[in-house]
Amino acid sequence: MTSILTAAQREKLAKAIIHKPPYCSGTLPVPDGELILFYGKDEDARRLDFGGASEGALQHLSQTCEAATFGLNKEDILDETYRKAGKLDSPHFAVKLDLDSSGLLEIVRTKLLEGRKAQGSIHAELYKLNVYGEGSFFKPHKDTPRSTNMFGSLVIVYPTAHEGGALTMSHEGESWTFDSGKMLAGHSEARIGYVAFFSDVDHEVTLVKSGYRVTITYNLYFVDPPVYMSLSPSVSSTGEEFRSAFVALLADPTFLPTGGHLGFGLRHEYPLQEKPEGTDVLQYMKKYLKGSDADILLVCEELSLEVELNIVFEDYGDTVILPKAPEVEGIYLEENLCDYLRRECEAKLIGPPVDGTSDTVERSSHEGQVDVALQWVTDLTQLNVQKSNYTAYGNEADLAHAYGYIALIVEVGKLGDRATRATLSV
């Protein structure tokens, strides 16, 4: 008998996936000497102390900057209708602020990251200095990850008087605001503002009405532990609710009594093109899951459930999944893409289960049966797409596009024997 996931069971599991805000922010007291900046493009370097910077000193810094560009399709674009600000690249400035001794990296690691990632090390790479003077702004955009292990950005705001220039962030229909001008105003001690956020967060800098907003941006990277070091899995605080809901369902005799497969659409975006050459994108990407995506992976592993990233393709009403990204760029096809992937790449045809005596259902597009009866807990998203071009032959050759969407696929065993993941005994 096919196991059917009820609407109530699906809702219980989906609602237990907590999407923690994808950022952390605040202010941090620092020693007076750590508010010093050195900058310049030639021998006439300057020293600026933000503990008491004058209007003239800030104006000189602003005038030393170049017009800030932004990244688009791997190119640097200068368009002051979209971004108006000044910038200095890292070779042209130096900061006295010590991220390690200040405790800021530890704050970011523990507040932004969770679970296994919060136990590991992170690295902050000095990137740019930006000055937003009166009339400056930056319209909504996302940062471009420099590699797969880059997970976000850390922005330091110096304590200069400014009105406007708030950083607004949005993700998955929610939004947040970090107004550094207001947060830094009125403090007698040396203090900086900070905000760290994931790379897939949309953000903008609102119009600066007065003063100068001066920021230092760092790129944030996961640091892989040495091969001999094994971090014990640790479910995050937000993942605990998902774990509790899943454990309760696994004990419920009405929940997938004969077992089944569950699908979870990813809620974060990852730089698929930045993987090392020769590595499979799915296996490489698995190490860098974040937020609720990482929670689902870790909980399922802890519960001994087989869980893997799969790539999903759809064509002419059929849908297939693969545990490894296929090479379809430039191929020539005279058949359904899904049929080709099943024959040549061991793809599995998926579909929803129906009541019956087997765990397969008839295909809607032509005769046959699905290989895996898959039920989606959360919808497949278009955040992580692998696009390939190929030639499809019908009455004539035509350029076609294959879009692969990445999701987490979980295998649940039958009642009384739920485990589907092999575990090592020691």
Image (tube, grey):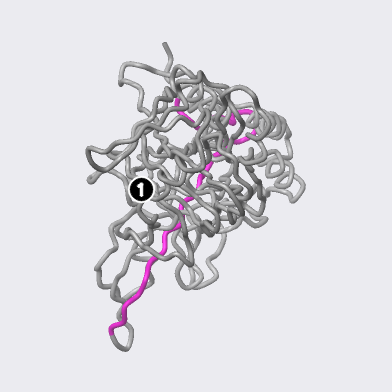
209 relative to 31, above or below: below
Is 234 displayed left or right of 252 in the figure? left
Q: Quadrant of the C terminus?
A: top left
Residue at point 57%, 60% (across, down): 361
Which stretch is magenta? 397-422
- In this rendering, the answer to whether 40 lies above or below 372 is above
Residue nearest the viewer, comparing 197 with 136: 136
Query: Is residue 272 in sight in this rendering?
Result: yes
Residue projecting furthest to the bottom: 395
Task: Name the residue that disc number 1 marks.
Answer: 64
Q: Is residue 415 magenta?
A: yes
Q: Main secondary structure of the magenta part?
A: strand
Q: Would you say residue 318 sits in the magenta stretch?
A: no
> Which residue lies at the image location 51% right of the left edge and 59% below the top edge?
382
Residue 182 in which image quadrant: top right
Q: Position of residue 285 (x, y in %)?
A: 39, 41
Question: How far across and how far down the image is residue 163, in percent?
Answer: 63, 48
Instruction: Tell me residue 260's x, y (percent).
Output: 58, 44
> Farthest top residue?
426
Q: Is residue 330 left or right of residue 223?
A: left
Q: For numbered disc 1, what is the local secondary structure?
A: helix
